[in-house]
Image: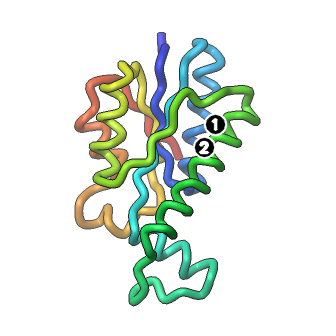
Amino acid sequence: MFKRIVVGVDGSSTSDNAVRIACDLAGKYDSALYLVHTPQPQTVAFALGAVAGYHAVTTMPSLEEVEEAASKIVEGATAIANECGNEIVEARTDQGDPAQKITACAQDVGADLIVTGRRGLGSIGSLVQGSTSQQVNHLAKCATLSVI
C-alpha cells in the first residue's frame, strides 16, 4: 500500500511521533523512508535562545548554526528510525518553505504517503500563514497523515 513514505521533521516532539508512526507503517508495508527538514532561522534562533541564553528576538543564527541545528535534527530523526528498526533512504535539508519542500520530495521520490507532526516548532508563524501540515495537506498529490 505505502511503498515510499516521506516524513517532514523539525525536531519537535510531534515530529518525533511522526517518525515513529512512519516507521510503524514502513514496517507493516515494507516501505522506504525519506526525511525532509527545512531549517528555519527563526526556529533555530528560538532553540538557541532556549538552550544557550541567546536573545532570539535580536540575534539571528549564522548559516553555520542553522546547518548545525539541521544536522542534529536529521540525526535525531534518523536515530529514532534506527531504534524502530528502519533505515532512512534519503534525508534532505533544503532552505525554503517547509510544505513546498516536503511535497516536492514526495513528488520526486514517488511517495504514497507524507507524514508530518500537526504542531511543530513553527507555531508562531502558523498563526499568520497556516501550519505546515495544513499546507502539505493542500499541496500533496498523495495521501497525508498529520499526527499529534
**Residue 114, position as x, y percentages in the image:** 42, 31
User: Viewed as shown, does residue 69 lie left or right of 79?
Assistant: left
User: Viewed as shown, does residue 76 lie left or right of 138?
Assistant: right
* Badge 1 vs badge 2, beta-carbon distance below 8 Å: yes
Residue that appears at 54% across and 81% down: 49
| Element under disc 2 | helix
**Is 146 placed above or below 28 here?**
below
Label disc, if present, on residue 17 of the rendered structure = 2
**Is 85 placed above or below 66 here?**
above
Badge 1: residue crowd in 10 Å (few <14, some 14–19, many ≥20): some
Residue type at the position of mark 2: Asn
**Residue 123, position as x, y percentages in the image:** 40, 64
Residue type at the position of mark 1: Arg
3D distance between C-alphas at marks 1 and 2: 5 Å
Label 1 sits on residue: 20
Q: Residue furthest top?
A: 1
